Image: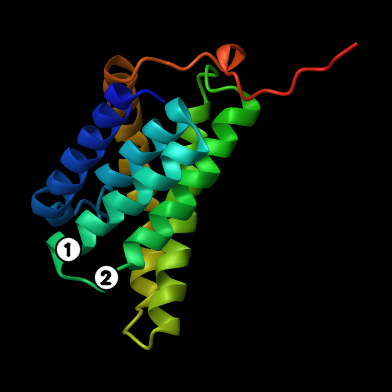
Amino acid sequence: MAAAEAAKAAGLLFLAAVVQASLVSAVIIFGGSPDLLLVTLVAVALLRGSAAGAIGGFFAGLVLDTATLSTLGLSSLLLTLAGYWIGRYGETTGRDRAHAPFVSVGVVTVLYALGSLLLHFVLGEPAPARAVLIDGLLPAVALNLLLTAPVYAVARRVLRPVSWTDRTSEVRLLG
């Protein structure tokens, strides 16, 4: 990934982290809250791959943890894992499929909630499972799915799609 493309992805994730921490996290609809940062990370990881997804997830999580004064590294860990695995999904199945962003956002929203709940429990912090899993998970998934199309369209416009056939790191068979 070129330096200009990396800067665009970093700027997009930084903007999403700041907007998430300052505005979006206060919005609660039907008991759930949308996660703009998670949806943006999915878009970046699908368009740029697993390495960019993991690096972007780490730094976006660090910005989010710093801005919200929550446990430092918790969001970084979860977003790093999410960015890596969504990037791998994009690399292996083809990011040009229309359903890929929606499937990715739905799955990663559920796994992010479960991972966050598990990490809070392990750290001995209050982890209200009922509020997270029963009351807020379905509305959060629905709100994130509503954000997916516009966020993915903006990310696709800002970040030019990578052609995986042009990669020089591919293995070439001799003979």
Residue sitting nearer the eye, 89 or 72: 72
Query: Circle 2 sits in a helix, a strand or a loop, which is it?
Result: loop
Residue 44 point in image, percent of width and height: 38, 32
- The quarter holding residue 11 reads top left
Q: Amino acid at mark 1?
A: Thr
Q: Answer whether labels 1 and 2 touch (C-beta < 8 Å).
A: yes
Q: Which mark is residue 159?
A: none
Count of all numbered marks drawn on residues in the image: 2
Residue 160 point in image, percent of width and height: 36, 15
Hey, which residue is sitting farthest front in the picture?
174
| Mark pair 1, 2: CA separation | 7 Å
Can residue 136 be seen in the rendering of this structure?
no
Q: Which residue is mark 2?
A: 72
| Label 2 crowd (10 A; few <14 / some 14-19 / many >=20) | some
The C terminus lies in quadrant: top right
* Above-or-below relation of 23 to 116: above
Q: Residue at x 22, y 63 (%)?
A: 65
Query: Circle 1 sits in a helix, a strand or a loop, which is it?
Result: helix
The N terminus lies in quadrant: top left
Q: Which residue is mark 1?
A: 66
Can residue 42 be seen in the rendering of this structure?
yes
Residue sitting nearer the eye, 139 or 36: 36
Hey, which residue is sitting farthest left in the picture?
22
Going from the N terminus, do you reach mark 1 or mark 2 first?
Answer: 1
Whether residue 100 sits left or right of residue 63 in the image: it is right
